[in-house]
Amino acid sequence: MIKPDGVRRGLTSEILARIARKGYRVVGLKQMMISRQTAETHYGEHKERPFFGELVDFITGGPVVAIALEGNEAIAGWRAMMGATNPANAAPGTIRADFATTTGENVTHGSDSSESAERELGLFFAAGELLD
């Protein structure tokens, strides 16, 4: 996902170009607003943490670009492309090192496992919206 800060700053094309250069296939792509209910479900594992409300406010504060990727080791590869959550710790050349401004506004999101990916794709894409 390209988060609201990335969309607002016009980084969508650059991020999609990096995905294409890496060789991943985009099988789902849409710009959307995330409802508060969907955001709370998406970040449900953080519900008891003090920053939960800020996460939900941020992700619902502007349009996002939901992306479904396919390819060899796509989950691990996308996470490596994004870099560390805190941009100060992100490796040079990663999306977050190049574009993120803070830990809270770090441009992108990626699922951390195939189970998370399946759950998250179900939140953002309806049946039939992903290419075969």
Image: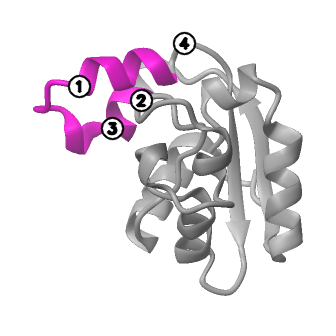
Asked whether the residues under the numbered discs 4 and 2 touch, taking CB atoms below 8 Å apart as contact, a structural biologist would say no
Please identify the quadrant where the N terminus is shown.
Answer: top right
Residue type indicated by callout 3: Tyr
Residue type indicated by callout 4: Gly
Q: Which residue is mark 1?
A: 51
Q: Which residues fall within the magenta stretch?
A: 39-59
Secondary structure beneath dot 2 equals loop
First along the sequence among labels 1 and 3: 3
Residue 14 placement (x, y as % from top left)? 85, 46
First along the sequence among labels 4 and 3: 3
Asked whether the residues under the numbered discs 3 and 2 touch, taking CB atoms below 8 Å apart as contact, a structural biologist would say no
Which secondary structure dominates the residues rendered in magenta?
Answer: helix
Q: CA distance from mark 1 to mark 3?
A: 11 Å
At horizontal 73% and vertical 19% (from top left) the residue drawn is 8
At horizontal 51% and vertical 18% (from top left) the residue drawn is 60
At horizontal 79% and vertical 73% (from top left) the residue drawn is 24
Residue 19 relative to residue 77: left or right? right
First along the sequence among labels 1 and 4: 1
First along the sequence among labels 4 and 2: 4
Secondary structure beneath dot 1 equals loop
Q: Which numbered dot is residue 43?
A: 3
Q: Which residue is mark 2?
A: 104
Q: Which numbered dot is residue 61?
A: 4
